[in-house]
Amino acid sequence: MKATEIIHRVRCPDCGNERLEVHVSTAGRDEFRIACANCGLSMSVSGNILDSDPAGDSQLPVWEAHYRSEDQEPLLRALEAGFSDRRILEAHYPLVRLLGKIPCPLRSSIELGCGSGAFSLVLKKLGLVEEVTLLDYSIASLTTAQELFKHFDMECDLVHSTIGEAPFRAKAFELALSAGVIEHYRSRAARYSCMSKHLELASYAFLQAPVSSPFYWLSRTVYTAMNRGWPFGFERPVGIFEMHRLARRTGARVIGHDHQYFTSFPLFTRLHWLPMPGWYTIPFANEVAILARSQR
């Protein structure tokens, strides 16, 4: 993350000022601070991490504990199988299929609430996006994502921030994406704000979330029993019609929607095989996805 590159994208998350100043550290060129002359806010950059010192919430300890304890080995093996056979990734990720509807590669993307960063890694590895940025308010999540990218010898920029206070200018990216994020917002107004933030930061928005289906509730019940509790905090499934309504409220045009059916990505990829979704997998859908384009 270079100061000369990032300064053209960032803005002050407190007052919205876009004329920020860069102060390079004597420790090295990859360490500097970005300061707002208007309100005095300061953000640090060290290596490839921009830190806006975000405030936490009641769910932050949940995600910190999850990413500190989760075994990433099954995901690594599944991704390795997918990168050796693109069809596996196309079958598992609605993102890959939906991006086939727009011109690629895109210049830049930002993943909001990035988690492990797997979605952005797939974009980068398949050449669908040239530069990827990962944002999360969990340090454990960012550390996990950083290690995942290093494992596959890929580069990314990391941002320690909440989604609502993402320190970037409007349309700083071509694509804003999230997977497993919007369902954690409790109110419809909060979900609308989440959708709006995607379309504020980028021309295209991709969102994927669990859908209320027998297979979602079955998997959630089993997972809860195995872990003696639901480890992911508040979560309410989102329907595809709700996703369409939220996108249209922002003035965006929906390019397409898709689904992910009930499956175990690591389990199927051990066999180096994954059935391609179609009308016959819709009854087994456990997540839905939407790709929209900003009209503003």
Image (tube, rainbow, N blue to C red):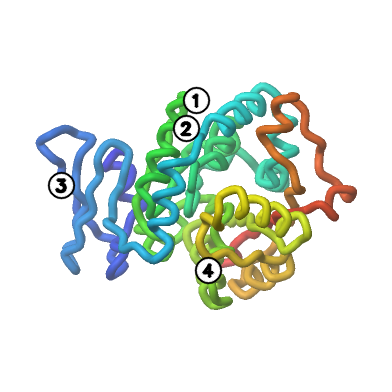
Please state which amino acid type lies under the numbered disc 4: Tyr
Whether residue 291 is visible to the viewer of this picture, yes or no, is no
Residue that label 3 marks:
23
Tell whether 238 sits left or right of 58. Answer: right
Q: Residues within 10 Å of mark 4 (few under 14, many from 20)?
A: some
Nearer to us: label 3 or label 4: 4
Q: Are circles 1 and 2 on residues that touch, CB within 8 Å?
A: yes
Instruction: Name the image quarter holding the C terminus.
Output: bottom right
Please state which amino acid type lies under the numbered disc 2: Leu
Nearer to us: label 3 or label 1: 1
Q: Which mark is residue 91?
A: none
Residue that label 4 marks:
185
Report the residue that reaches farthest toward the top. Answer: 84
Q: Is residue 132 above or below residue 18?
A: above
Q: Are circles 2 and 3 on residues that touch, CB within 8 Å?
A: no
Q: Earlier in the sequence, mark 4 or mark 2?
A: 2
User: Residue 106 occupies which quadrant of the picture?
Assistant: top right
Q: Earlier in the sequence, mark 2 or mark 3?
A: 3
Residue that label 2 marks:
148
Q: Is residue 92 above or below residue 174?
A: above
Please state which amino acid type lies under the numbered disc 1: Phe
Q: Earlier in the sequence, mark 3 or mark 1?
A: 3
Please state which amino acid type lies under the numbered disc 3: His
User: Residue 263 occupies which quadrant of the picture?
Assistant: top right
What x and y, as percent, mark residue 214?
Answer: 78, 59
